[in-house]
Image (cartoon, rainbow, N blue to C red):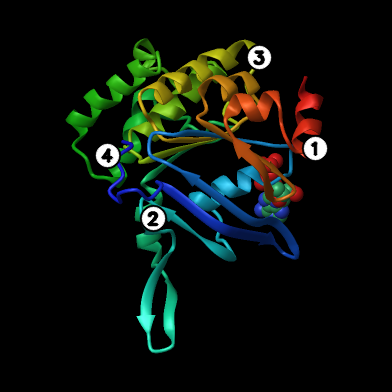
Amino acid sequence: MSSSASGGMPLVHAVNVHKSFGSVEVLKGIDVDVHAGEVVCLLGPSGSGKTTFLRCINQLETIQGGRIWIDGELAGYREKNTKGGRRLYRLKNKEIAAQRREIGMVFQRFNLFPHMTALENVMEGPVKVQRRPKGQMREEAMGLLETVGLGDKSSAYPGQLSGGQQQRVAIARALAMQPKLMLFDEPTSALDPELVGEVLQVMRDLAAQGTTMIVVTHEMAFARDVADRVVFMDGGVVVEQGDPAEVINSPSHKRTQAFLSRLR
Ligand code: ADP
C-alpha cells in the first residue's frame, strides 16, 4: 500500500497550497511532505484549515494556488510544454476521479450506507467502482472486517452497530479500495469517550503495518505515540512541524504553546 513508484519523492508533496472560500483565505501557502509509510498528524485550533487541507489533498476542494503531487502525479492537472513555457491543464473529471480513488478518507461522521450490511458497505466500492469480482471481494472484505475487529458483525446493519463499530467499518471500507494514502479527519471526535479507544487502536495497527496516513486529531496521546511527525497549523499556515514528542512536549512557537496549554 505504501509503495512509492517515484524514487525519493514524497508520497504527498504539497507546495505553497492556497485555498479561499469567497474572499476568505483559509490556506495561506501550506508546504507539507509525507513519505511512504509515514504517519503525520495535523494539529491545531479549530478553524485553522486542517480539514480544508485534507480535502484539498483528496481534491474535494480545488486549490487556487500551489501544487500537490501524490506519488509523483500532479493532483488535478497535467503540465505541458508550450511555446510560452510550461502550462497547467485541468484534468477531465474522469481522470480526477481516478486520482481520488488512490486515496482513502475517513470522516468525522461515518456515512455508511444504512440499507447495506457492514460487509456490503465494505464491498460496494471495489465491486461497483473497481469492478472487482464479487466472490473474491467478499473474502477480502471479510478479512478487512476481521482486521478492524468486526469479523462477527459482517451481516449487521449500521443502525445495529455502535458509533465506534460504524467508524471501524468506515475504515475497512476505505481500505478495501487499496489506497496509497489514508486521510483521517477527526475520526474519533463524534464518538462517545468510551468508544474512542477501539478506533484509535485500529489506526495504531494500520500505522504499525506501514500504512501512509495523515490524521487530523485532537488526541495528543495518539499523536505523540503513533505519529512520525506532527504538523501544527494555525490561521491557515504551518506554524511548526517536527518530532511529536519535541513539538508536543516543548513547542518552540508561542501559538503552539498556547494551543497545547489549553488542552492540558
Ligand atoms: P479546521 O479543520 O482546522 O477546524 P477548517 O479547514 O474546517 O479548519 O476551516 C478553516 C476555515 O475555513 C474556517 O474558518 C471555516 O469556517 C472555513 N471554511 C471551511 N469550509 C468552508 C466552506 N465550504 N465555505 C466557507 N468557509 C469554509
Residue 127's disc number: 4
Name the residue type under label 1. Lys
How far is disc 3 from disc 4 in space, using C-alphas?
34 Å
In percent of width and height, residue 52 lies at 62, 48
Tell me which residue sits at (64%, 59%) in the image: 19
Label whose residue precedes the other's in the sequence (3 or 1): 3
Is the residue at mark 3 in contact range of ligand 1, meaning its CB lies under 8 Å from it?
A: no
Q: Which residue is mark 3?
A: 193
In percent of width and height, residue 139 lies at 22, 23
Answer with left or right where residue 209 lies relative to residue 55: left
How far is disc 4 from disc 2 in space, using C-alphas?
16 Å
How far is disc 3 from disc 1 in space, using C-alphas?
30 Å
Label whose residue precedes the other's in the sequence (4 or 1): 4
Q: Nearer the viewer, mark 3 or mark 1?
A: 1
Q: Secondary structure at mark 4?
A: helix
Is the residue at mark 2 in contact range of ligand 1, meaning its CB lies under 8 Å from it?
A: no
Residue 97's disc number: 2
For residue 90, above or below residue 138 = below
Q: Nearer the viewer, residue 35 or 27?
A: 35
For residue 170, above or below residue 3 = above
Name the residue type under label 4. Val
Q: Badge 2 local density, few (<14 within 10 Å), some, or many (20+)?
A: some
In percent of width and height, residue 15 lies at 53, 57
Name the residue type under label 3. Pro
